[in-house]
Image (cartoon, grey):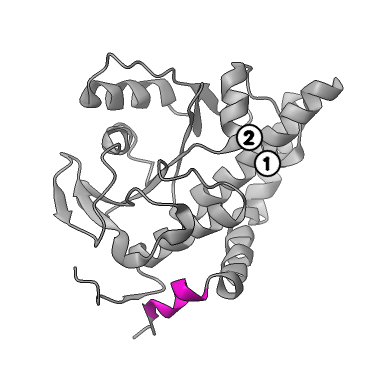
Amino acid sequence: MTPTTRFTQSSPHFRIAAARRMLYRAGLDSQIGGHISLRVPGEEAFWVTPFQYFDETLPEHVSKVGFDLRVIEPGTLPASPGINFHASVMMARPDVNCVIHTHTRNISTLATTRRKFGVYYVYGSMFADLVTEFVDDPSLTPDKEGAAIAAALGQNKVALMPHHGAVHVGETLEFTTIETMVFDLACEYQLAAITAGGEPMDPATAHSYREAYYKYGFREQMWRANFRRLQRSDPDLFASAVAEA
């Protein structure tokens, strides 16, 4: 694509850029190291973001990359080189259409404590029994690292990475973005609650809350609310889009 390529607001490129900016506005920036990927329907490929701060992202920066890590459609900025595990996770998990990697403060701090994630805040119920851990191993080659992350993730939503950050997965870009935001908040509450001597929510109550959030469309409404906020805070993003046909 060229610097003059324009995208509609429903395009995957625009939605990915919007997701990155939502994360930034919620305090989840990851300097230039985090990335978001979205599976290309019907292809062994995904769209993915480059090295940059989250609030910089425009649709034109997003690249299309094959599961073999070959760049199929380059963006105006090169795709991040640290994306091998996105392909590995998508190949291992047909139910996963979006992968988000972050280095956020609250998530990274909790990961470094090596404590098990607990539901200390009601929104954390969405992750009850769905958080695992992956410990970085510098001896692994990129292809083996990707397979190791996918294996550690299993059927969970989040893999905490001590001294690093986390990998988040989900069925849609919108749901995964909101869940990443909520997970960071839940980690913040857990860290504070541990210091104050708080206790986690019991599993039965946590599962009940999770079902209610899914039933009443919490994630959909959160995406829409954050999208409305972006229209006010990030006019440059919306200026980059063209009207729907």
What span is in magenta?
A: 235-241
85 lies above or below 48: above
Residue at the spot 25% in from the left edge and 75% down from the top edge = 5
Is 218 contained in the magenta span? no
Amino acid found under the numbered disc labelled 2: Asn
**Quadrant the C terminus occupies:** bottom left
Depicted 81 relative to depicted 23: above or below:
above
Whether residues under marks 1 and 2 lie with C-beta atoms below 8 angstroms apart, the answer is: yes
Query: Is any part of residue 230 visible from this angle?
Result: yes
Q: Earlier in the sequence, mark 1 or mark 2?
A: 2
In the image, what residue type sits under mark 1? Leu
Q: Is label 2 in a helix, a strand or a loop? A: helix
In space, the residues marked 1 and 2 are separated at their CA atoms by 7 Å
**Observer-nearest of 76 and 93:** 76
Left or right: residue 86 compared with residue 107: left
Residue beneath label 1, please? 185
Label 2 packing within 10 angstroms: few (<14), some (14-19), many (20+): many
Q: Position of residue 51 (x, y in %)?
A: 34, 48
Residue 199 appears in the rendering: no
For the stretch drawn in magenta, what is the main secondary structure?
Answer: helix
Residue 235 picture location, percent across and down: 51, 76
Q: Secondary structure at mark 1?
A: helix
